[in-house]
Image (cartoon, grey):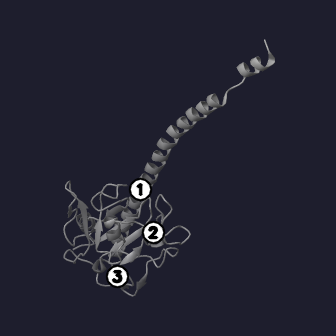
Amino acid sequence: MPLRHRSRQAGFTIVEIAIVLLVVGLMIGGLVAPLSSQLEQRRVTDTQRVMEDAREALFGFALRNGYLPCPAISAIDGREDRAGSICNKRYGYLPWATLGVQRLDGWGRVLAYSVTPSFANSVSFFTLNSPRDITVATRGMDGQIIPASDANDIPAVILSFGRNGYGATSDQNTQLLDAGQGNIDEKTNLAGEGVAFVTRPASTDPRAPGGEYDDLVLWMSPNVLINRMVAAQKLP
């Protein structure tokens, strides 16, 4: 048998190599997608746990002090930003140092926090009748905004800006710009007033009602807060 013919049989053609590379690429791609999805779900779960820990710390702070803390001084100084009995702001960063909790979500960004001013007054403590001014909404099956809480009923809210992090501050104290287009509900959560928030399932579809969305919103139930205060004989 000629040497040239034997070499052709022993080796691989360019077409065969291309097919092998294609198959390997498809196999790797099939593995990467599930791993990426699992990693993202892990970040969501970690963020939910951190936020729930922070909410429990807020309940504990109220039971110990009779009021809720102010937002933090800055993204790197987690002490509450208080001037006497009044907060210097009502919407900002979670006061993680004051609460003794983790400050970052699963994507490595500082959690946000909004508090009703009457609940953060450290002289005139809140009572059963203290006014609340935060409202949380969601989207119904028809895509329209519907209440997730009673109007002006929430004492405080904790917020993560999710995977895209639009408007969030990184661990390196760098604020990410809101680069979203049509992400109406995320822009509502980012608004500086801190009195209106939207919570709904995540969506990467810009055509969805309210646009793309990946924020996580957790709020303090006024009923739970009041019940715990009454049980601890802090109220009425």
Secondary structure, mark 3, is: loop
Q: Which disc number belongs to residue 168?
A: 2
The x, y position of residue 142, in whole percent, is 19, 56
Q: Disc 1 and disc 2: Cα gap in Å? A: 19 Å
Q: Nearer the viewer, residue 47 or 69?
A: 47
* Residue 49, numbered circle: 1
Which residue, as the protein is rendered here, is positioned at the far right? Answer: 3
Res 138 quadrant in image:
bottom left
Quadrant containing the N terminus in the rendered view: top right
Sequence-wise, which precedes: disc 1 or disc 2? 1
> Among all residues in the image, which is located at the extreme bottom?
84
Q: Would you say residue 63 is visible in this rendering?
A: no
Residue 203: % across, % down? 35, 55
Q: Which residue is mark 3?
A: 122
**Which corner quadrant of the image does residue 67 belong to?**
bottom left
The residue shown at (34%, 64%) is: 183
Mark 2 residue element: loop
Whether 70 is drawn above or below 110: the answer is: below
* Rendered location of residue 44, percent (x, y): 42, 54
Is disc 2 surrounded by few (<14), some (14 to 19) or many (20+) residues within 10 Å? many
